[in-house]
Structure formats: structure tokens, C-alpha cells
């Protein structure tokens, strides 16, 4: 039985196309997909729905397909979902070879806590890397532990996994540390209090004159 971490997927060739057939596939618990790349003609297949749904939750998932007894390594390039029900409607798969270098966007995970009183704002959620097709990192990490106001982490500061090369601009901002601005509500309350104090001082002479 396949598990969530098992990337070996048995795919069925399909010769029927169209929205109606795709709906029937999904109703049967399968996902329509197309395989392309390396100069080959597109191949249309049906994938086991539950297993593939779990696998594609990971960015840049690689699936080891078995199609009519033949093995095919593929990279998940696009997952089309129903915007309301989040059901997978179609998947695009790119043919890849073991040892081949490919370009992928890898998620950036921020760890640690910046200096007390500051906040770390993540400006970029991913970076573009060149990596081996069979060694795509799930994510890369940057630590903001103890960083003070004004600290900046750029793409060039990221420690990359072995064999990976940065394709993004090294100066791309990933995280910036700053001190949060005072809430607008507090400023408005202070202004109201100042106005009230000024109003009270303006009224005092009038009362003295009346006496």
C-alpha cells in the first residue's frame, strides 16, 4: 500500500478527454494529468486521487510514475484546484532525469525570534534555485534569532543545501527587522486628550471674567 511519503505512483493512460470525462475521473477518485518535456509528445494520464493529494502538499514534489510497466520520473509543475472546494482538477507534470539540474522556487522558512521589541517581516516567501531533480530541498531556512532593528537578510545570505545554486538576485530582500510603529488609535487618543486639555484652559479665563 502506498504511504504519504511513497513517491511511486501507478498512473493509467487515458485516451478520452474533455470536461465531462475529467469530471467522471474525479468522481471515481482519480486526477487527470498531463506529462510533457524533453521533446516528447504530451502524455495524458489518470492518477490515484488520495495518494497524489497528499504528495503534492509538498512544494516541487517529484513523482516516480509507473505507466504500463515503464518508469517515468516527473516534477509537479502546476496543480489546478477548484477555488471553492479546493479539489484538485488537473496536474501538469514535467519529465525529469536523475542527475539533471532544474530550476525551482523553494519556500523560505524563518526561524528564531528577533531582539525584544522588534518584528521580523518576511518580504519574499521563496527563492529560485538550480538543483538536481532528485534532490530538491523542501525549504531553506533563515534565522532572525537576536537580530536588532535595521537588520536585513537577503537571498545571498541564505545557506544553501549542497549542490544547490542561487539563481535569484543575491540582493533580493528576504527578511527585514524593525520596530513596529505606534498604533494609529493611540495617536488619535493622545490628540483628543491634548485638544480636551487645550479646551479646558481656554474656558478658564471666561469663567474668571464672569465672576
Image (spheres, rainbow, N blue to C red):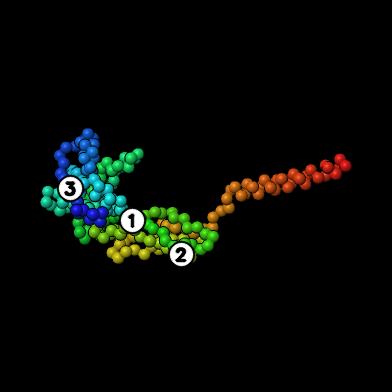
Instruction: Tell which circle, 2 or 1, labels the residue nearer the N-terminal end.
Output: 1
Q: Residue at x 39, y 54 (%)?
A: 125
Instruction: Tell which circle, 1 or 3, labels the residue nearer the N-terminal end.
Output: 3
Judge whether 76 appears above or below 165 on screen: above
Residue 177: x, y in percent? Answer: 49, 59
Judge whether 25 appears above or below 165 on screen: above
Crowding near the residue tagged with mark 1, few <14, some 14–19, many ≥20 C-alpha atoms within 10 Å: some
Q: Which residue is mark 3?
A: 11
Compared across the picture, whether 159 is left or right of 179 comes to left
Q: Residue furthest top?
A: 20
Per the image, label 3 sits on a secondary structure element best described as: strand
Q: Residue furthest left?
A: 69
Q: Quadrant of residue 109?
A: bottom left
Compared across the picture, whether 30 is left or right of 201 comes to left
In the image, which disc is placed on residue 17? none
Q: Is residue 128 visible?
A: no
Residue 211: x, y in percent? Answer: 88, 42
Distance Cα–Cα, label 2 vs label 1: 22 Å
Q: Which residue is mark 2?
A: 145
Mark whose residue sits in front, 1 or 3: 3
Per the image, label 2 sits on a secondary structure element best described as: loop
Distance Cα–Cα, label 1 vs label 3: 26 Å
| Towards the viewer: 123 or 68 | 68
Per the image, label 1 sits on a secondary structure element best described as: strand
Amino acid at each position: 500500500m502506498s504511504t504519504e511519503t511513497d513517491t511511486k505512483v501507478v498512473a493509467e493512460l487515458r485516451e478520452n478527454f474533455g470536461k465531462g470525462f475529467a469530471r467522471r475521473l474525479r468522481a471515481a477518485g482519480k486526477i487527470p494529468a498531463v506529462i510533457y518535456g524533453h521533446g516528447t509528445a504530451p502524455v495524458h494520464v489518470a492518477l490515484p486521487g488520495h495518494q497524489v493529494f497528499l504528495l503534492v502538499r509538498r512544494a516541487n514534489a517529484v513523482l516516480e510514475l509507473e505507466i504500463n510497466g515503464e518508469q517515468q520520473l516527473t516534477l509537479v509543475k502546476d496543480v489546478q484546484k477548484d477555488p471553492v472546494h479546493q479539489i484538485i482538477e488537473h496536474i501538469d507534470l514535467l519529465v525529469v532525469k536523475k542527475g539533471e539540474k532544474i530550476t525551482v522556487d523553494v519556500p523560505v522558512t524563518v526561524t528564531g525570534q528577533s531582539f525584544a521589541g522588534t518584528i521580523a517581516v518576511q518580504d519574499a516567501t521563496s527563492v529560485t534555485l538550480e538543483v538536481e531533480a532528485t534532490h530538491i530541498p523542501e525549504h531553506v531556512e533563515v534565522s532572525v534569532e537576536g537580530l536588532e532593528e535595521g537588520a536585513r537578510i537577503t537571498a545571498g545570505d541564505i545557506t544553501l543545501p549542497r549542490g544547490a545554486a542561487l539563481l535569484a538576485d543575491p540582493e533580493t530582500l528576504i527578511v527585514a527587522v524593525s520596530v513596529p510603529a505606534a498604533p494609529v488609535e493611540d495617536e488619535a487618543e493622545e490628540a483628543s486628550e491634548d485638544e480636551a486639555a487645550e479646551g479646558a484652559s481656554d474656558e478658564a479665563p471666561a469663567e474668571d471674567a464672569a465672576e
